[in-house]
Image (tube, coloured by chain):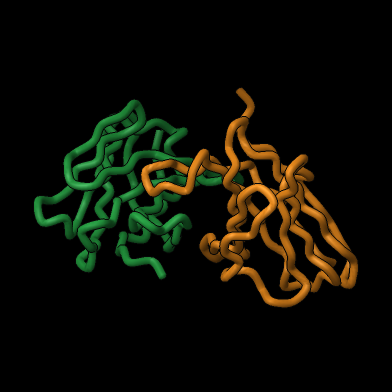
Chain colours: A green, B orange
Amino acid sequence: DAKTTQPNSMESNEEEPVHLPCNHSTISGTDYIHWYRQLPSQGPEYVIHGLTSNVNNRMASLAIAEDRKSSTLILHRATLRDAAVYYCILRDLNDYKLSFGAGTTVTVRA
Amino acid sequence: NAGVMQNPRHLVRRRGQEARLRCSPMKGHSHVYWYRQLPEEGLKFMVYLQKENIIDESGMPKERFSAEFPKEGPSILRIQQVVRGDSAAYFCASSPTSATYNEQFFGPGTRLTVL
């Protein structure tokens, strides 16, 4: 049921920024954009979410296109600990469950 | 401020046995969600519970699977007469409300292996 499209994988060097794109061309006005990540052998972990405006927190930044049909998760300085599968998820106002797609597998090179 | 706790972390069962997976949500959270991650597949929603109520079990197989979240104690996901296809990682998440803007906090998962 995932309504987002992400690249299968991305590689980055340690301490360099990582830009993870997500396309969601069928997004509705009440869909929030959520990002979660899953480190190896762990449960998913919330990263960030937004509706229309760009968002920043201690983990990452979320840049949302003006038409909201795409967004980009930005990890400002990748560390080895950021190696994970990153999931971009749309959640409607009334949608309590998370619909995970395949996500993007991020590899960080030392 | 403990996070979501799940036990056991690893569970091995033989075909036909029962598996009981436990989930203690974060303190103050009354909403619990169970997800399953089959090998080489993505996470799939199974069931959503509030205290003493099942709100949505649309993702749970109709047979052999059941879930509960009693007034006191952890949430339990029960799988009767396990088969090899039940081998997966089962994750529990909790949130203070079901609102979209609330993040879900996940536990470390229970990895079930059916021999």
Reply above or below: B58 against B21: below
Residue A14 lies in what quarter of the image? top left
- Single out the residue that lies furthest toward the top: B1
- Single out the residue that lies furthest toward the left: A66
Q: Position of residue B4 (x, y in %)?
A: 63, 37
- Residue B107: in sight, yes or no? yes
Q: Position of residue A25 (x, y in %)?
A: 20, 66
Relative to the observer, which residue lies in front, B75 or A11? B75
Residue in the image at 77% along x and 40% along y: B73
- Residue A90: in sight, yes or no? no
Reply above or below: A43 against B15: above
Q: In this image, A39 relative to B111: left or right?
A: left
Reply above or below: A78 against B106: above
Q: Position of residue B44 (x, y in %)?
A: 54, 63
Q: In this image, B101 relative to B10: left or right?
A: left
Q: In this image, A31 relative to B51: left or right?
A: left
Q: What quarter of the picture does the C terminus of chain A occupy?
A: top left
Relative to the observer, which residue lies in front, B49 or A78? B49
Marks counted in the figure total 0
Residue in the image at 68% along x and 37% along y: B5
